[in-house]
Amino acid sequence: MRYRYSCPACETVSRPYALRGMADAHADDHRHRHHDGDHPWGEDIVTEPGAAWWDIPRGQAIASVIVLVVLIAAALTR
Ligand SMILES: [Zn+2]
């Protein structure tokens, strides 16, 4: 499952996210940047089927690998 933030006021849809929380964070950032923190009427988090590892946007995949490496390094240095 992939998640996108949809803002009908701006007629825009975010890039897909593998996690709902990341789409929610995008929505929060969008509201603050474009709507002074208000919730546009009709905004939504829409879902798409068919997510897989290769569907994760490159930046999110790189960040996930970095976090994993840091966690492993932290566990090994204790
Ligand atoms: Zn908007």
Image (spheres, grey):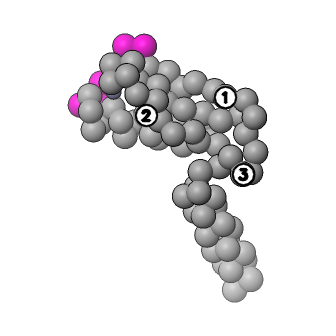
| Segment tinted magenta in the rendering | 36-42
Q: Amino acid at mark 3?
A: Trp
Q: Residue at x 37, y 40 (%)?
A: 29
Q: Residue at x 26, y 28 (%)?
A: 35
- Magenta stretch: dominant secondary structure: loop
Whole-number angstrom distance, CA of label 3 to CA of label 1:
15 Å
Magenta stretch contains residue 37 = yes
Circle 1: element type: strand
| Image position, residue 48 (x, y; %) | 66, 28
Circle 2: element type: helix
In the rendered image, the quadrant that contains the N terminus is top right
Rendered position, 5 above or below 43: below
Seen from this angle, which residue lies furthest bottom? 77
Which quadrant would residue 49 be assigned to in this image? top right
Query: Which residue matches tag 2?
Result: 27
In the rendered image, the quadrant that contains the C terminus is bottom right
How many neighbours does mark 3 have within 10 angstroms: few (below 14), some (14-19), or many (20 or more)?
A: few
Residue 48, numbered circle: 1
Rendered position, 28 above or below 55: above
Q: Amino acid at mark 2?
A: Ala
Query: Which residue matches tag 3?
Result: 54
Q: Amino acid at mark 1?
A: Glu
| Image position, residue 53 (x, y; %) | 74, 51
Q: Which circle, 2 or 1, is nearer the viewer?
A: 1
Circle 3: element type: helix
Q: Residue at x 49, y 21 (%)?
A: 44
In this picture, residue 62 sits left or right of residue 50: left
